[in-house]
Amino acid sequence: MCVVAFAWRSHPRWRLLLAGNRDEFHARPTAALARWPDTGVIAGRDLRSGGTWVGLDARGRVAVVTNVRDGLARPHDGPSRGALPTTFLDGAMDPAATTAELLATADAYAPFNLMLADTGACWHLGNHPRQRQALAAGVHGISNGRLDAPWPKTRHLADALQAWVDAGDDHLQPLWDALADERPAADAELPDTGVGLELERRLSPVFIRGETYGTRASTIIAVDHDGRGFIHERRFGPDGVFEGETVLRNTGA
């Protein structure tokens, strides 16, 4: 997932509200959102590595990972970043303990940002730069840079989520609209991540439409203060063609 915004303990109904897009090559095999029969995790699944990019469990715990862009992608023979969310969602440890344990081996993974949340806390772990912290209540955003970096796509999605929280409305359409935003950023606002100006332009919208690479899924997760909630996934194929959607609820704490 390449851009995500989440509101932590800042909405009267939802303890956590997350909205994000996963950008990936369309040829990479992926299973749609489902309950995993082996673990009970509710998530989509990367069929190449077996992990996920964002998921929810029965207790209302949430995990999401993004990659960090620092030049063109290089070959990596370490563990998959998709294992990071499942380490938490499959386990019994809280976000603080999980991030502390993962910190010891964080350098074995390609660059990542990881957010974990349960009933009591929301934590961020990154390895490029290396950082671990508990997050304060409020709206946060992550794309392919550091936490809350003011990239245009991150800022646009986080601002839309903040406006939704401020409006106090449970209707999700403004968030879906924000996730579908294809406006490119102005050149002066683009980050310099070492991939060249043309690629920075193509990767700058919240929603990326492309023949071989683009937004594969848009996801909204909402969890209330009792741990009950839902995960809603909309899927897209080459050139942004809509391919279906799934909504699943969890049982709560």
Image: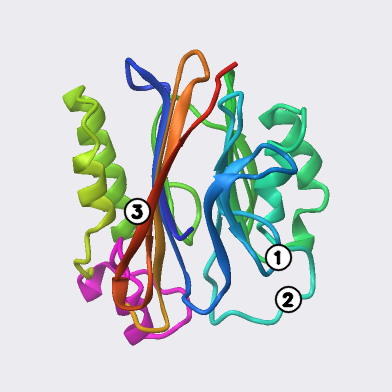
Q: Earlier in the sequence, mark 1 or mark 3?
A: 1
Question: Please, what secondary structure does the residue beneath circle 1 have?
Answer: loop
Mark 2 to mark 1: distance in Å? 13 Å
Q: Is residue 170 magenta?
A: no
What residue is drawn where x is 37% and y is 69%?
A: 191
**Which residue lies under the disc numbered 2?**
76
Label 2: few (<14), some (14–19) or many (≥20) C-alpha neighbours in 10 Å: few
Q: Is residue 206 magenta?
A: yes
Q: Earlier in the sequence, mark 2 or mark 1?
A: 1
Mark 3 to mark 2: distance in Å? 26 Å
Residue 235, percent from left and from top: 39, 60
Locate residue 10 relative to residue 113 in the image: left or right: left
Residue 187, percent from left and from top: 23, 75
* Residue 64 visible in rendering: no
**Which residue lies under the disc numbered 1?**
49
What residue is drawn where x is 65% and y is 65%?
A: 47
Please tell me in which quadrant of the rendered image residue 40 appears.
top right
